[in-house]
Amino acid sequence: MSSYAQLAVLLALGTLLGAMPLVLPLLIAPRNKGKETNNTYECGVDPIGSSWLRFGVGFYVFALIFVAFEVDILYLFPIALVYEDFGWRGFIEIALFLSILSLAVVYAWRKGVFKWAK
C-alpha cells in the first residue's frame, strides 16, 4: 500500500470517527418530548420565577481568572516532576513564570476584580 493510500485511509477513518458522535445521536435519540422538557429544570421541583436571571459580570470574570490560573498551575506539575534535570536555568524560568503570574494576580487585585459586591 502506498503512502498516499495509507493517508487516504487514515483521513477517511478520521472523518468517519469524527462525524460519528455528531450523527449517531440524531439517529438514536428519542423524538418525543414530555411536558417537563421545556421547564427550566427537570429535577421534579416546580421552578419559581423566570429562568432568565441576570448575573453580575463579576461571576464570569472570577470564573475566567480561576480557569486561567488553574491552567497555568497545571503547567507546573510536569516541570516539578523533572525539576532535577533543569538546574539553575530551569529554576530561573519557573521563577520568571511565577512572577509574571503573580503580576497578573496583583493587576486583577488592583482593578478590584476580587471585591465581591453585594
Image (cartoon, rainbow, N blue to C red):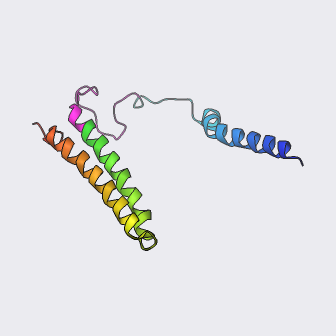
Q: Nearer the viewer, residue 58 or 44?
A: 58
Tell me if 22 is positioned left or right of 82 in this view: right
Residue 101 x, y percent position in the rendering = 29, 50
The magenta segment is 38-59
Q: Is residue 86 above or below residue 11?
A: below
Q: Nearer the viewer, residue 44 or 70?
A: 70
Tell me if 25 is positioned left or right of 48 in this view: right
Q: Residue at x 42, y 74 (%)?
A: 84
Q: Residue at x 82, y 46 (%)?
A: 6
The furthest residue to the front: 89
The furthest residue to the bottom: 84
Q: Nearer the viewer, residue 113 or 81?
A: 81
Tell me if 11 is positioned left or right of 89 in this view: right
The furthest residue to the right: 1
The furthest residue to the left: 118
Tell me if 31 is positioned left or right of 19 in this view: left
Q: Is residue 79 above or below residue 20?
A: below
Decide whether residue 52 is among the magenta residues: yes
Q: Number of marks in the image? A: 0
Residue 14 x, y percent position in the rendering = 70, 42
